Image (cartoon, grey):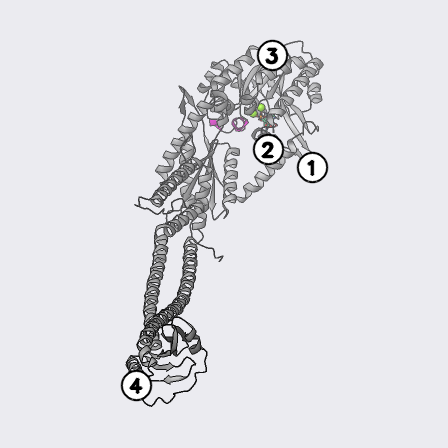
Amino acid sequence: MKLRPGLQAQLVAVILAATLITLTVIVLIVQRQGAMRQEMLDHSRQSMHALVHKRLAQQGRATAERVAESLVNPLYYFDLEGIGRVIATLQRQPDVAYVIVYSPEGDILHDGSHDILTYGQTMDDRFARRAMAATAPLVQSDERTLDVAAPIRLGDQPLGGLRIGYSLENVGADESAANAGLARALEAIGARHRQWIALLLAGLVLLGVALSLLVQRALVRPIRQLADAARQIEAGNFAAEVPHSRRQDEVGDLMRAFGRMGESVLRHDRDVRRMAYTDALTGLSNRLAFREVLDQRLIESRGAAQRLALLFADIDDFKRINDTLGHDAGDEVLVQFSERIRGVVERESGGATLSRFGGDEFVILLEARDGGEDLRESAGLLAGRLVDELSRPIAVRDRQVFLGISVGITLFPDDANGATMLMKNGDIAMYQAKVAGKNCYRFYSRAMDQAVERRVRIEQDLRGAWERGELSLLYQPVYDIGAHRLVGAEALLRWQHPRQGMVAPSVFIDVAEQSGLIETLGPQVLRAACADAVRWSRACPTAAGAPPFLSVNVSPRQLRNADLAGQVEEILGETGLAPTQLHLELTETAVIGDELRVSSLLARLRERGIKIWLDDFGTGFSGLSHLRRVPIDGVKIDRSFIADILRDPDDLALASAIVAMAHSLGMTVVAEGVEQAGQFELLRERGCDYAQGYWLGRPMKLEELIALTAPGDPPAV
Ligand code: C2E
Ligand code: MG
Ligand code: MG
C-alpha cells in the first residue's frame, strides 16, 4: 500500500516541527539566560568590589586625614606614648590590620605595639615616600589589604606619615556572601522562568494535540467518509450511504451538498435505468433488461437444478400493417398486442418475464415453478394460448385486422446452456413456426439448426441464379373441361442447381419469399412468362375462340411490397402481351387481412383486362363468403381436394359446393392436380370450368407447349 501524507499526518508534522523549533528557541534562550546570569554575576561582583573599595578608600582617606591631624602634635613633640594612644584607638576599629607612623625618610616610628618592635626599620616600598610628597592621602591595595598613606604636616613642614592597612578579608567574605546570595536569587528566578517555559511548552503540546484531534474530528473524518462514499458511487454503487451532518459550518454544508448530489445521482441512475430498460411504446421491459434477467437466472441456476423456457413470439405479417395502414396504426397494433400477450402471460403464468425485443418480437422467460417436470408442457400450453388469443381480430381505426403470432420455444438446459445460444435457438424455433405456416408454435430441435443452415445456403445460392441461367419456366396446360380444349397454361418456375440438380419450388420459393428475393425474382418471371406468352400466341394463332392465356403465380410479398400494378403494366407494355391473356394467381393468405388495399390493387388490374385467380383454394381459412369483398375472377381448387374425389364423398361434396358457390358469385373454377380420367369426368359432371393436372399435361417447356397446340393438331383430350 502506498503511504500518502494525509491531512492529519500533515498537521501532526507541522505541529511537531513547530514544537521542535520552539524547543530549540527555548533551549537557546535558557542557554543565553545562563550566560547572562553569569555575566551579571561577574559584573555585579566587580561593581560591588569597586564600590566597596572606593568606599573603603574614601573612608580610609578620611580616617587617615583625621588621624594624621591628631598625630601632628604628638609627632611634633615626638610623644611616642601619645602616638601609641592614637594608634591604639585606630587599631580597635574593625578591619584595621596595621597602623604605622613613619618619619619623612620612611623609617618606622611607631607600629602601635607596646614595644614598637619595628622601630627604625625602613619601609622599602616607595608608596610611603610618595605619600610624603602628596597633599592628600594616597591609597593602594591588593587582594588582601587596602593601604592608605597620609602625610603628617605642620603647616608646610612634613613631620612624617601615617600608614593604615585595612584587611580586605572580611570585606571579601561579605562580598562573596552577597554574590552567592545574588547567584541564588538569580538561579531561583531562572528556575521559575524555566518552569514557565516548560508550562508554556506543555500548553503548546496540549494545544497541538487538541488541534490535531479537532482537525481529525472536524475535517479528516468527514472528508474520509465523503471520500469513501464518493469511491463507492464511482464504483457504481449509487445507493451508497452518504454521511449526514447537522453541522452548521462549511463542512456541514459540503456534506449536505454531497448528500444531495448522491441522491440526485441515484435518481438519475434510476431514470437512466428505467429509460434504458423499458420499451417506450409498450412499457414492457426491453431486450437489454431481458438479457440481464436471463443472465441472472442462468447464474442462479448453476447451483440449483433450475429449468427455464424461452418463448420467442413474432407477429405474423406485421410489416403489412405498417405498409398499408401507416406506422401509427402499427404502433397501435403493437400496444394492443402487447396488452393481450401480457394478459395471457399473467393469466397462464404469473411469474414469467415478458419483454419486447423490438419490432414485432416479444420474448417470455418462463421458470419451472416446482419440480420442473411440466415446464415443457406449460411452455407449450402458454404458447398455444398466445396463438389462440392473438389470432382473434384486432380493431384498429374502425377496421378489423387479422394477424397471428408465431412462437418458438427453447428450453434450458435441454437445448443450450448459454444465453446467446438460447436466444438463437428461440429465434430458429420461431422461424420454423413461420415456415410451418405461421400462427402456431414450435419447440426447438437440433434438426432445426440444419434446416436453418439449409435455408441459408439456398438463399445464398438463389441470389443471382436467374442471371446465371439456372432458373427457367415450365408451362402446365390448362384445359376447358366442357369444350375439351387447351385454353391456357400456368407458368411454373424451375431451378437447376449446379450441384444439387432440380430443387423443388416448394423449397426455394418459400426461401425467396422469406428473404425478399422474390421481389426481384417475381418481375423477372413475369417478364419472361409474358414474352413466352407472346411467342406462344404468335406460333399458334387460334382461329376459333380466344387466344390462350398464361397464368403467373404472384407471391404475397410481391402483392404487398412492390407496385405490382405498375410492374405488370410496364411488362405488358414491354412485351406487347394483351392484358386479357394474362392471369395472376394469388394465395388466400396474401389477400385476407388487408382486403381494402388488395381490392383496389386488384380492381386496377382487372380494369386492364387481367384476370385474377385465387390459388390453392380451400387450404386457407377463408370461406367463399369472405372473398366476396375481394374482386377476383376465379378460384383454383387445391389439388388436395381433387386427389380423393373419386373415393371420398366428403371431398367430392366440398369440391361440388365450391363450384356451385363460385358460380353463384360469377367466378370461374379451376381444378388442380387432375391425375385421372375419372376425376376429369366427375369434375365435368359437377360443372367445373377448367382443369389442370398430370393427366392433362405435365409442366413442359415452351417448345413442347407450342408443339402441343400447333394448328391442326387438336389437343389430346
Ligand atoms: P401451384 O401454383 O399450386 O402450382 C401447381 C403445382 O402443382 C405445381 O408444382 C405443379 O407441378 C403441381 N401439379 C400440377 N399437376 C399435378 C398433378 O396432377 N399432380 C401433382 N401431384 N401435382 C401437380 P410445382 O411446380 O412444384 O410448384 C409448387 C408451387 O410453387 C406452386 O403451386 C406455386 O405456388 C409455386 N410457384 C411455382 N412457380 C412459381 C413462380 O413463378 N412464382 C411464385 N410466386 N410461385 C411459384
Ligand atoms: Mg399456381
Ligand atoms: Mg395451386
Q: Is residue 647 magenta?
A: yes
Query: Few, some or many C-alpha atoms within 10 Å of disc 2 (few <14, some 14-19, many ≥20)?
Result: few
Q: Is residue 524 left or right of residue 168?
A: right
Q: Is residue 697 left or right of residue 43?
A: right
**Where is residue 559, by image quadrant?**
top right
Residue corresponding to mark 2: 507
The residues tagged by marks 4 and 1 sit, at their Cα atoms, a distance apart of 176 Å
In the rendered view, tell whether residue 701 sits above or below residue 295. above
Among numbered discs 4 and 3, the one appearing first in the sequence: 4
Residue corresponding to mark 4: 81
Q: Is residue 480 visible?
A: no
Q: Secondary structure at mark 4?
A: helix
The residue at 40%/25% (across/down) is 394
Among numbered discs 1 and 2, the one appearing first in the sequence: 1
Q: Nearer the viewer, residue 352 or 68?
A: 68
Q: Secondary structure at mark 2?
A: helix
Among numbered discs 4 and 2, the one appearing first in the sequence: 4
Query: Few, some or many C-alpha atoms within 10 Å of disc 3 (few <14, some 14-19, many ≥20)?
Result: some
Residue corresponding to mark 1: 499
The residues tagged by marks 1 and 2 sit, at their Cα atoms, a distance apart of 16 Å
Badge nearest the viewer, 1 or 3: 1
x and y percentages locating residue 123 in the rendered image: 43, 83
Task: Say which quadrant the C terminus sits in.
Answer: top right
Q: Secondary structure at mark 1?
A: loop
Among numbered discs 1 and 3, the one appearing first in the sequence: 1
